[in-house]
Amino acid sequence: MRYKQRLKVFYRRAILPVLRGGVTPLFRLVVKLAAGTGLLAKTRARAGGGQEHFAIVHLSNHVGDTVMLLPMIEALRCAHPAARITCIVQAPIGALLRLVPSIDAVHELDIDHGQTATLQDELKRMLQILRGFWKGLRGTRPTVCIIPRWGCGYRDLMLSYVLQAPTRIGFASNDFDETQPPAGYRDTLLTCTVRGAQRMTDPARFLYLVEQAGLVPHTDPRAIDLLPNASMRHIAATVEWPALAARIGLDPDCPFVVVAPSASAPQRMWPVERWATVVDELHGSGFTVVLLAGKGDASVAGDLYGLVPPERRSQTALVAGVTSLVESSSLIAHSQLFMGSDSGPGHIAGALGIPCVILFIAAEGADPDGPSAPERVRPMGQRVMWCRPAQTLAPCVGYCTAKAPHCILQIALEQPQRAMQQLLGGLQPD
């Protein structure tokens, strides 16, 4: 197992840069030839009247990553009220962003986000980006492309290059680890590289990117957590709550807690048997408990519902695969507490100002800039508490890399229970 991990690290650090180093010049040549023959002429024409046009390229398929972009988008709109702001995202994230008042247009692409293994895979991805541009983005004319992903985002960079924006802003390839040499194949696709984003949460990091590029004035990163996010609250308010509550079998005036036991990655899921104990304690405190899940992980919430004693079913609502992303946001906005794994619904809850208890798979003392570190990827909000394992289980180092629940099993039942009791405090229902 440890050998496989070392092989993966070697591939990521040695083989993948070589593959991309070969693909990037070919990609740039194809784009230049297309521009020279007039195929990209539409992108060279700028919006009339010299209007600024910001294109945010963020090809992530994770809801949480998208929610963490909102403070940056709001700051751009505040600093440039007359500008056009376009977001280019991975399907199906656009449903959320189309409701953000600060955004003028949203384009969804369907580009493979799996692990690249061969040169053939890289060439296939390059063709997907070119096809995605040709089918839906030829009329997009940005003056500035913003590529906020940190330490990755190669697809985002390629797409921003096809858009031919005069200014393309992103983080330097070795900003994550300055001891590593810069990745020329990546940095040459940018016109402005930014450094110095370590030890920040991702929302603060995204805001830092546009600050350093001179697009917005400096904002204290702590301000992001002081108030609920305005865009997220607007999204939640687009749903008529009494009608939604009636459809899913809830009293709209009844205090309830949302428990979301699933996550996009299996290693982030705490056992449903432990969640059942937490749910039982919430029932004992007088709360109705909503078990929330999307269509793809409805069975996990169903398994948890199956562990609820029959006499407590009247205090439990199973909302699994029956609400849209926007409807789920409205549901969370009316809750008194959110509990779940490191996942999209937790980020929605934090941005809405809902008290949260979130379980993470990065161990205590792990790199705070790591991909699963709560110091980096925790939800926004003042009332967010997290639980994490004291240490990882071999062969994992720092954070869990297993393909099933593994290091998260080190989180004792008492940890989320204590956090839950602390956050609820005076919120106990009559």
Image: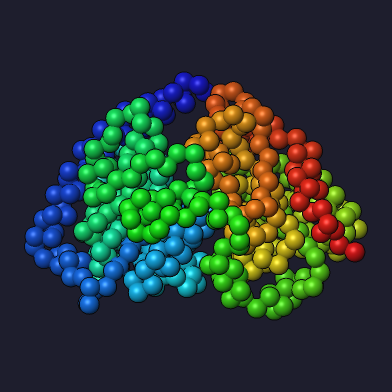
Residue 106 seen by the camera: no
According to the image, what is the colour scheme of the structure?
A: rainbow
Q: Residue 251, image x and y in percent?
A: 80, 72
Quarter of the view holding residue 26: top left
Rendered position, 251 above or below 399: below
Q: Residue 100, image x and y in percent?
A: 49, 70
Give the residue at x 58% y 41%: 374
Q: Between 31 and 372, which is closer to the camera in this rendering?
A: 372
Is residue 90 left or right of 223 when viewed as pictured? left
Residue 358 seen by the camera: yes
Give the residue at x 56% y 72%: 234
Rendered position, 22 above or below 51: above
- Quadrant that contains the C terminus: bottom right
Task: Count how many numbered circles sit on residues in the image.
Answer: 0
Kindly give the residue lying farthest to the left in the view shown: 37
Give the residue at x 62% y 31%: 364
Kindly give the residue lying farthest to the top in the view shown: 3
Is residue 426 left or right of 293 when viewed as pictured? right
Q: Between 17 and 195, which is closer to the camera in this rendering?
A: 195
Q: Between 79 and 388, which is closer to the camera in this rendering?
A: 79
Q: Residue 260, image x and y in percent?
A: 68, 53
Is residue 363 left or right of 17 when viewed as pictured? right
Give the residue at x 76% y 73%: 252
Q: Residue 183, image x and y in percent?
A: 28, 36
Is residue 130 left or right of 283 when viewed as pictured? left
